[in-house]
């Protein structure tokens, strides 16, 4: 959802540089790559994406705040 907020939906299989990128499902990899490229989602401290883990509230809020900051910066 957040990847789509940027206005251009991800397409195809991406090449995210997360250490566990091979574990990210095909349908989600392009979006994960896009979020990483925009700096909205940086992954875990060990460089992983952890696609099978449950996202924490803090992680979700961090992505939302980064998205909001990018929107504010785009308007100034």
Image: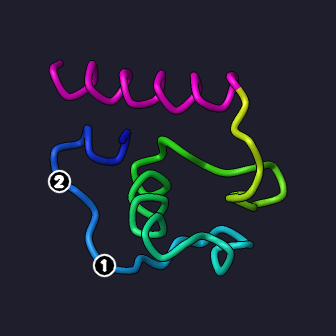
The x and y percentages for residue 54 are 74, 42
Question: In screen coordinates, is 2 left or right of 54?
Answer: left
Q: Which residue is mark 1?
A: 12
Q: Residue at x 34, y 47 (%)?
A: 3
The x and y percentages for residue 46 are 84, 57
Question: In screen coordinates, is 31 left or right of 51?
Answer: left
Principal secondary structure, stretch drawn in magenta: helix
The x and y percentages for residue 27 are 43, 69
Determine whether the residue tagged by mark 2 lies in a helix, strand or loop.
loop
Residue nearer the viewer, 69 or 32: 32
Vertical placement of 54 versus 20: above or below? above
Q: Residues within 10 Å of mark 2 (few under 14, many from 20)?
A: few
Residue 8, numbered label: 2
Determine whether the residue tagged by mark 1 lies in a helix, strand or loop.
loop
The magenta stretch spans which residues? 57-76
Q: Residue at x 48, y 69 (%)?
A: 29
Q: Residue at x 48, y 41 (%)?
A: 40
Question: In screen coordinates, is 40 left or right of 42?
Answer: left
Q: Residue at x 26, y 38 (%)?
A: 5
- Quadrant assignment, res 76: top left
Vertical placement of 12 versus 52: above or below? below
Residue nearer the viewer, 74 or 7: 7
Residue 55 is covered by the magenta coloring: no
The x and y percentages for residue 53 are 77, 50
* Separation (CA) of disc 1 from disc 2: 13 Å
In the picture, the quarter occupied by the N terminus is top left
Counting labels gives: 2
């Amino acid at each position: 959802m957040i990847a789509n907020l940027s206005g251009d939906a991800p397409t195809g299989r991406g090449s995210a540089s997360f250490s566990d990128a091979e574990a990210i499902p095909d349908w989600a990899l392009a979006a994960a790559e896009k979020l990483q490229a925009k700096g909205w989602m940086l992954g875990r401290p060990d460089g992983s994406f952890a696609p099978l883990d449950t996202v924490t509230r803090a992680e979700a809020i961090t992505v939302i705040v980064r998205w909001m900051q990018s929107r504010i910066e785009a308007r100034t």
